[in-house]
Image (cartoon, grey):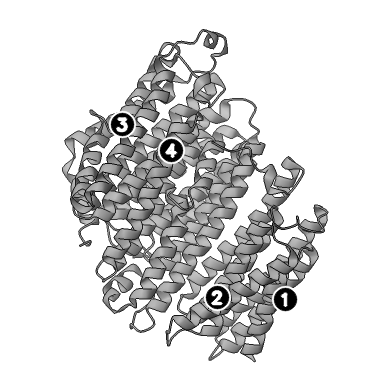
Amino acid sequence: MINFLIIIFIVTLLYMAKNEIIKQYIFILALQGFLLFFIAVLELNQIEVGQFTLILAETLFFKGIFVPVFLSRLVKRNQLKRNYKGLLSGNASIFVGTLIVILSFSMAHALHDEHLEIKYFAAAISAIGIGFYVAINHKDIISHLIGFLIIENGIFLLSLALGGEMPMFVNAAILLDIFTTVLIMGIFFGRIREYFHDAHTDKLSKLKD
Amino acid sequence: MLLLFFTGSVLLAVLAYFIKKKIASHWIVIIHALMICSLTIHEFVLPGQVQLVFFQSDYLSHIFLGLLSIISLMAAFHYIGYARTGEIPVKYVNVHNFGTILFTTAIVGVLMANHFGMLWALMEATTLTAALLIQHDRNEASMEATWKYLFVCSVAIAIAFAGVLFLGFATSDADVEGFSFEAIRNSAHLLDSNWTKACFLFIIVGFSVKMGLVPMFNVDIDAKDASPSPVGALLASVVLNAGFVSIFRFYEAFSGTEIHSWMNNVITVTAMLSLLFSTVYILKVRNLKRLMAYSSMEHAAVAMLAFASGGIGYFAAIFHLSLHALIKSTMFFQVGQLHNIFGSKLDYNIRDYLRINPIGALVLLACLLSILALPPSGMFISEVMMLEAIFVGQPWWLMLLTFVLILFIIYGMSKRILAIIYEKSPSNGAQIQNIRRWESLLQIGVILIVFYIGFVKPHFIVSIIQSAVESLP
């Protein structure tokens, strides 16, 4: 079952790599939030109330509901439909995404670590790589935000590969940090649009040497 | 005590946000800076107590808490002057003061954390609170800098978090109790070296954004340029130091293992590239704040190079970063005054400063001598110690390259700053406004402290730094 969910997660990553429609990005981010919730719950050896609550908060509520709703409102307010066409086209992006996934799996296998959950590790590295690709390929700040959220999903999977090593309080602090980051980034996204009347990164070139 | 400090800080931040009068809001920030001073004294008198499970001060925390106390107090006083210029609305001032209190509180947390996960979480908190400070002026430049800082720092800190997770992989075989510094240090020899290498690499990349080193230095430069000078002063001093402390914690934990020399190589590469980039930009830039920012990058790079050289380099690096924090923040405050007087940050618009503001010019000259590590500045002593460490611990050609690059930097910095102080310009007379001499007097106090520390090298400061590095090989 977990393998199946991981495969769906990787497919969503590839779709993210080629996508250019903002609404679809948001839908897929919500889907990834739900997938991560089920993966995390299935991974638990025993259900502890505290740990379960934290997973529920981080995946289902935060990644699956809060972020998509927040982004939808942001997109609606700023009347965004598509992000700026990327440096590489849709098909080339699929190719790059696939390459990242293959490299991630090869890397995970090459590590030969018995404690390493290869499937989580490879999916995590793929998500981090594709997150970077989305942020770099499209020259607009909404893609930066979406790229960052994909990277965060990858980091979450990486923490699953590690197991529950962090104390509850530290996990809660980390969750609070990520929550605030998304919130503040969202607020500044609106401000940037106000000041520059556009979300293209080429407009952000006032500061230079 | 720490619980009291954190609770008090949050309450003061909320109060500073909602209070209607500017001056009352400023006083709240000053009270908070005094709270940091009290906490520093408390930790110094009663060291080593574990507080709130994840915090425990040590000698390294004492050094940088002391610096944070002085610099945050200075920044609070200078911001009062900054907020008086122009028509800065109460709302902007309140948001700034709210952000300052939370920001310095997060820095205190970073300095006192004894757990790698908590260290990371508080480092991220410094990014978020710094964003509130950088956006202060609400113009295109500040918005651009804030967005870039927020985005790149968040990505960098996420990379650092991956580093923390790799540390988790490294502990899989070793029976390690949690992620506390002590637990990791005690079982470092049992850790998987490949994972500890990956951890350290990701940590260096992630926290380079805070220290202003290669590869993630750009946003740090923009942030210092676009923010008010008291904020630039904090970013160039306490944030740089917090970045150093974070890297130090990981370095110290792994220093007893086989990857010690590998870590030194990674730091050396990062430091040399940073030195190279900073030299190129120091020779090129005309914006004074960016010049200061690149100068910070240069000092951080040389300090890290000395640190990676080992031996006396450990002591010299911490000593140098401490003096640098005091001088560079003072220099930012003075550049803020120049900006206020001349209405420009570009060096060719600022001339004849000695005639216009002799006290300010004296401060600028003393800062220049310090930052170039020339006598009678204390930084001369620390730089000589660092060069000695590099000479002993690094190949001769690296020492030579460092020396040549520093010479270029001395030329670039002195050319710009000396022209500002001495060069006459007939067009300046009409533009002069708002000289706040009391600010320069405060700055002279800090410069005298640096001169005194450098030359007298008080025994208690030397012994604290020696104790901070005694665990290193």
The CA span between labels 4 and 3 is 21 Å
In the picture, the quarter occupied by the N terminus of chain A is bottom right
User: Could you tell me which chain the residue with mark 2 belongs to?
Assistant: A
Q: Which chain carries label 1?
A: A
What's the residue at 69%, 53% (across, down)? A139
Mark 1 vs mark 4: same chain?
Answer: no
| B168 to A144, vertically: above or below | below
Crowding at mark 2 (Cα within 10 Å: few <14, some 14-19, many 20+): some
Q: Which of B274 and A171 is in front in this view?
A: B274
Q: Badge 4 is on which residue?
A: B280
Parent chain of label 3: B
Does B410 appear above or below B119? Answer: above
Q: Can you tell which mark lies on residue A103?
A: 2
> In front of the other: label 4 or label 3?
4
Tell me the crowding category of disc 4: few under 14, some 14 to 19, or many 20 or more residues within 10 angstroms, Cα based: some
Residue B307 coordinates in the image, percent (x, y)? 27, 53
Task: Give the mark nearest the N terminus, 1 or 2.
Answer: 1
**Same chain for the residues under marks 3 and 2 in the image:** no
Give the number of the mark in front: 1 or 2.
Answer: 2
Residue B260 in the image: state x and y as whole percent: 27, 65
The residue at which mark 3 appears reads as: B370
Instruction: Identify which residue is drawn at 25% across, 45% down.
Output: B399
